[in-house]
Amino acid sequence: MSNLDRQAALTVCGGRGFVVAEPVRELLSPRHVRLGESTEVRRLLPNLGRRMIGAWCFVDHYGPDDIADEPGMQVPPHPHMGLQTVSWLHDGEVLHRDSTGSLQTIRPRELGLMTSGRAISHSEESPRPHARYLHGAQLWVALPDAHRQVESHFQHHADLPRATSPGLTATVILGELDGAVSPGTTYSPIVGADLALTSGTEARLPLDPDFEYAVLAMSGEVHVDGVPVLPGSMLYLGCGRTELPLRAASDAGLMLLGGEPFEEEIVMWWNFVGRTDEEIRQAREDWTTGDRFGEVKGYDGDPLPAPEVPAAHLKARGRVR
């Protein structure tokens, strides 16, 4: 999925200076962003108070939207570099195309994982015809410097491992949780899991104390470590936890995101993750005038034009312009 913000800001993320080294309960409110004609997303990362969670550097939550008489998701071809995209659905379908030739319909609780490496482009759209409801999350994972030039590729995994306890099913999207290991390729210590709880469930989820964590509420009423977390909001949990108490007041869906704190500082702008202002500007130029990002074949429409990069340069650690 693209960041369609035409006023996209250069953002410094990463580095341990942003990490809370102890358990906390920091509730993050979303920013509402239009995505095409009929989809509005709630952007949780990057957030004014929180830039990354492990290597997770971008989180959008959308829906549930009734798109029976709407075009649904329509994101034209656009570029990415320096990251992985994770497509995750609770309702609906998304048709993925990319410049490596991949063509795949992603359905609920199937993993669509695209690794950009140095450069890739892709499009995402609701199929025609499509299901009535669309509900899901789009997430990015920053690639560490040693793997930023990895060959671009796309993975689709329809059958993912699960960890279960009474009233709780955890589908492991990336990484490992309670002995269940995702087949998705990762390049840094990370975990992502979809948690489904039945009404009245009280559970304690095992965690790695070296990871920082957050929980994104997708649906239902749930208390996370005693804090009520409403759908479309995210609770940052810090580090140092060995378990996470959960209590569901209704059937509920959550996403658990975590990982070792990301050591490197990164620069994010539009759909690019780099290390310097100059690198970001070169990527924009390459998308606008060159063929570095390849061609998405089969999409009915023009590629997405890049916005202008802000004139100001990043000068201070952690400053957003």
Image (spheres, rainbow, N blue to C red):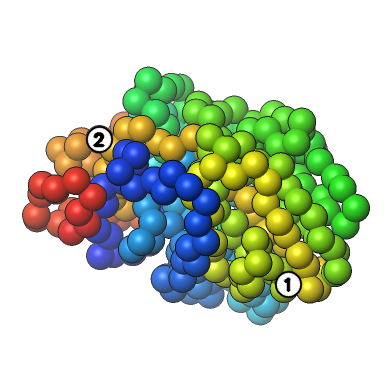
Q: Which of these two is toward me, 264 or 148?
A: 264
Up-down: is 193 above or below 102? below
Q: Residue 308, can we see it?
A: no
> The residue under label 2 is which amino acid type?
Arg
> The residue under label 1 is which amino acid type?
Gly
Judged by depth in the image, the label closer to the viewer, 1 or 2, is: 1
The quadrant holding residue 64 is: bottom right
How crowded pointer 1 is (Cα within 10 Å; few <14, some 14-19, many 20+) is rated as some
The quadrant holding residue 230 is: bottom right
Residue at 57 percent across and 69 percent down: it is 232
* Residue wearing tag 2: 275
Up-down: is 310 above or below 206? below
Seen from this angle, which residue lies furthest right?
166
How crowded pointer 2 is (Cα within 10 Å; few <14, some 14-19, many 20+) is rated as some
Mark 1 or 2, nearer chain start: 1
> How many numbered marks, from 0 up?
2
Q: Is residue 63 left or right of residue 9?
A: right
**Image quarter hosting the C terminus:** bottom left
Q: In this view, does 59 lie to the left or right of 96?
A: left
The quadrant holding residue 279 is: top left
x, y (%) of residue 118? 36, 29
Q: Which of these two is toward me, 202 or 53?
A: 202
Up-down: is 98 above or below 100? below
Q: Residue 318, can we see it?
A: yes
Local SS, label 1: loop
x, y (%) of residue 305? 30, 55
x, y (%) of residue 320? 22, 57
Residue at 50 percent across and 28 percent down: it is 188
* Residue wearing tag 1: 220
Residue at 71 percent across and 37 percent down: it is 177
